[in-house]
Image: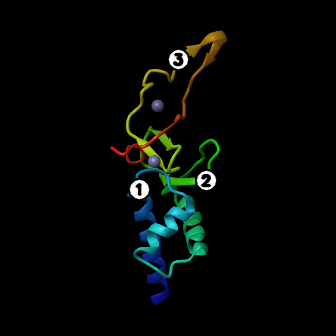
């Protein structure tokens, strides 16, 4: 019983961290964040919990170019990612600057159904603003 409660608390804390992040998180970022609340949390538990949350469809995998695997909650809707080339953090960018591109046919009959965009640049804190 106590063991189950502990597992539930760990799972809740991990999901909370992913839900309240500025962007998709790496396993190490999740570990560091949740260790603020549960110092004894180990990396194996994070991996096991991620697997469980993926199966539940509470979270999904985010694969960005030249980056390690990250995770975000499944309910965010369409958005883009901003990858800071200085601090290497990834941030969610609300909205879409190409709202009309899906359903558009580009040259020679290629029909766009969906898109994923990663913007690379410097985040406000790295720019000192
Ligand atoms: Zn930055
Ligand atoms: Zn978009």
Secondary structure type for disc 3: loop
* Vertical order, 40 against 58 (above or below): below
**Towards the viewer: 82 or 86:** 86
Residue placed furthest toward the left = 129
Q: Quadrant of residue 37?
A: bottom left
Q: Residue at x 41, y 74 (%)?
A: 36
Instruction: Say which label, 1 or 2, has the lower sequence index.
Output: 1
Q: Are marks 1 and 2 in contact (CB under 8 Å)?
A: no
Secondary structure type for disc 1: loop
The residue carrying mark 3 has its beta carbon less than 8 Å from ligand 2: no
Total marks in image: 3
Residue placed furthest toward the top = 108
Instruction: Say which label, 3 or 2, has the lower sequence index.
Output: 2
Residue that label 2 marks: 69
**Towards the viewer: 47 or 85:** 85
Q: Are marks 3 and 2 in contact (CB under 8 Å)?
A: no
Q: Residue at x 50, y 51 (%)?
A: 87
Q: Position of residue 90 (x, y in %)?
A: 49, 48
Q: Is residue 1 visible?
A: no
* Vertical order, 4 against 55 (above or below): below
Q: Is residue 95 visible?
A: yes
| Residue at mark 1 to residue at mark 2: CA–CA distance | 15 Å
Q: Is residue 54 left or right of residue 22?
A: right
The disc label shown at residue 101, or none: none
Residue that label 3 marks: 104
Instruction: Say which label, 1 or 3, has the lower sequence index.
Output: 1
Secondary structure type for disc 2: loop
The disc label shown at residue 21, or none: 1
Residue placed furthest toward the front = 128
| Residue at mark 3 to residue at mark 2: CA–CA distance | 30 Å
């Amino acid at each position: 019983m106590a063991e189950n409660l502990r597992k539930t608390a760990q799972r809740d804390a991990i999901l909370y961290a992913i839900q309240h992040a500025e962007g998709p998180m790496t396993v190490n970022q999740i570990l560091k964040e949740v260790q603020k609340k549960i110092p004894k949390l180990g990396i194996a538990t994070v991996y096991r919990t991620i697997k469980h949350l993926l199966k539940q469809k509470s979270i999904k995998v985010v694969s960005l170019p030249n980056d390690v695997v990250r995770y975000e909650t499944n309910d965010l809707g369409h958005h883009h990612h901003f990858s800071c080339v200085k601090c290497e953090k990834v941030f969610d960018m609300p909205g879409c600057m190409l709202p009309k591109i899906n359903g558009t046919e580009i040259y020679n009959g290629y029909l766009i159904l969906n898109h994923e965009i990663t913007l690379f640049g410097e985040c406000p804190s790295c720019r000192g603003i």
